[in-house]
Amino acid sequence: QVQLVESGGGLVQAGESLRLSCVASGSTGMINVMGWHRQAPGKERELVALIGGGGITRYAASVEGRFSISRNNRNTAVYLQMNNLKPEDTAVYYCNVRGGWNLDSWGQGTQVTVSS
């Protein structure tokens, strides 16, 4: 299995930036896709961004052009650079990894709050 620990959340004003980090440990060689999801109060968890083994990325339409996902070469960390944050970006952000042997691990989440 893979253990994930997120960091970097906090309280910012609209227009500011945050960088989230997620460190993976354990069977990281099994990881194929790394990503970030978020869940706002009263809403379902939604995909924010994904990055595949070849570096191919995918973003939710609501964050395209403002957020950027990256990973290190050893599959032990994934990052989410969030620029021009908006109040609607307020949510708990979760790191997720998927891969071989039905790997599907989640972090504990980090709170991001954007004030207007």
Image: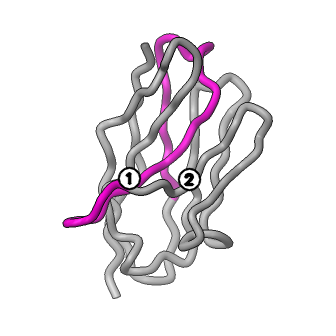
Determine the residue positioned at 38% across, 77% down: 88
- Toward the bottom, the furthest residue is 116
Q: Is residue 28 left or right of residue 37?
A: right
Amino acid found under the numbered disc labelled 2: Leu
Q: Is residue 104 left or right of residue 35?
A: left
Q: Is residue 96 left or right of residue 33?
A: left
Residue 80, numbered circle: 2
Please check the rendered image and state whether residue 31 is part of the magenta-colored stretch, yes or no.
yes
Total marks in image: 2
Asked whether disc 2 touches disc 1, contact meaning CB atoms under 8 Å apart, the reply is yes
Residue 91 percent coordinates (x, y): 32, 63
Residue 8 percent coordinates (x, y): 42, 51
**What quarter of the picture does the N terminus occupy?**
top left
Residue at which label 1 appears: 93
Q: Is 21 rendered above or below residue 16?
A: above
Classify mark 2: residues with Cα within 10 Å, few (<14), some (14-19) or many (20+): many
Residue at mark 2 to residue at mark 1: CA–CA distance:
10 Å
Determine the residue positioned at 52% across, 70% down: 17
Residue 34, numbered circle: none
**What quarter of the picture does the C terminus occupy?**
bottom left
Residue 14 percent coordinates (x, y): 43, 83
Amino acid found under the numbered disc labelled 1: Tyr
Determine the residue positioned at 31% across, 69% down: 113
Secondary-structure class at tag 1: strand
Q: Is 73 rendered above or below residue 65?
A: above
Please check the rendered image and state whether residue 76 is part of the magenta-colored stretch, yes or no.
no
Instruction: Tell me the magenta residue range.
Output: 19-45
